[in-house]
Image: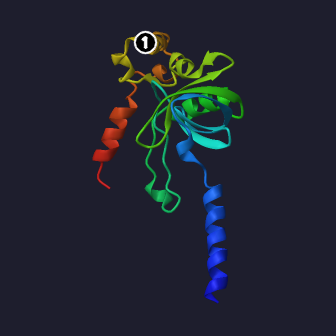
């Protein structure tokens, strides 16, 4: 009886291992693929060469979406104003479209931090320029990323997107306040 089960377990294990997504297969560099999902105004998923790649838009800090727990929906964490609009803006631009992603690094959450291009357009820069996100404060330290900061300043001046609000709260401050709230 044991000799019959061992090979079947071995075969099942080998099959399971072979069908798991190869998350470690993406490294810094250029990947072409299809955008299969967006989760908010700053994150999407690209299927590149059969690998699902979670992508964080480089230099873009989008408003925080409402988070609803499937197991306890009454414990939902509220999101920020304009988060849904930023999500829709990104979705309308890239969802189900072929893109080029220039992966700059892999972050601690195993996401590809990348610049997304569609038909030669820098989608990251468009999101900031249209007022759907802040230029990341990390980008302000790097001279080549000055275009993101300038795009944010122009969006602020035009009161585009989330800048229509009097004093929008940056997502990093919003997240810090949520952590401090009693549970």
In this image, 88 relative to 69: left or right?
right
In the foreground, 166 or 22:
22
| Quadrant that contains the N terminus | bottom right
Residue 12 pos. (x, y %): 65, 69
In this image, 174 relative to 130: left or right?
left
Give the vertical position of 166 relative to 106 (above or below).
Answer: above
Q: Residue at x 46, y 11 (%)?
A: 147
In this image, 130 relative to 176: left or right?
right
Residue 107 pos. (x, y %): 43, 37
Residue 56 pos. (x, y %): 50, 33
In the foreground, 144 or 133:
144
Residue 123 pos. (x, y %): 59, 22
Which residue is under mark 1? Answer: 144
Give the vertical position of 24 relative to 98 (above or below).
Answer: below
| Quadrant that contains the C terminus | bottom left
Q: Residue at x 49, y 56 (%)?
A: 69
């Amino acid at each position: 009886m044991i000799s019959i089960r061992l090979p079947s377990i071995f075969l099942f294990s080998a099959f399971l291992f072979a069908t798991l997504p190869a998350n470690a297969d993406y490294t810094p560099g250029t990947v072409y693929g299809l955008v299969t999902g967006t989760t908010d105004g700053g994150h999407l998923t690209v299927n590149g060469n059969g690998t699902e790649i979670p992508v964080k838009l480089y230099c873009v800090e989008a408003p925080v979406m409402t988070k609803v727990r499937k197991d306890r929906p009454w414990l939902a964490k509220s999101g920020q104003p304009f988060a849904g609009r930023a999500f829709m803006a990104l979705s309308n631009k890239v969802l189900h479209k072929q893109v080029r992603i220039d992966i700059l690094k892999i972050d601690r959450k195993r996401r590809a931090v990348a610049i997304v291009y569609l038909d030669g357009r820098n989608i990251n820069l468009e999101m900031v320029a249209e007022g759907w996100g802040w230029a990341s404060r990390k980008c302000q330290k790097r001279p080549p990323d000055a275009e993101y900061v300038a795009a944010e300043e122009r969006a602020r001046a035009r009161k585009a997107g989330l800048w229509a609000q009097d004093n929008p709260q940056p997502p990093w401050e919003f997240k810090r306040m949520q952590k401090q709230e009693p549970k």
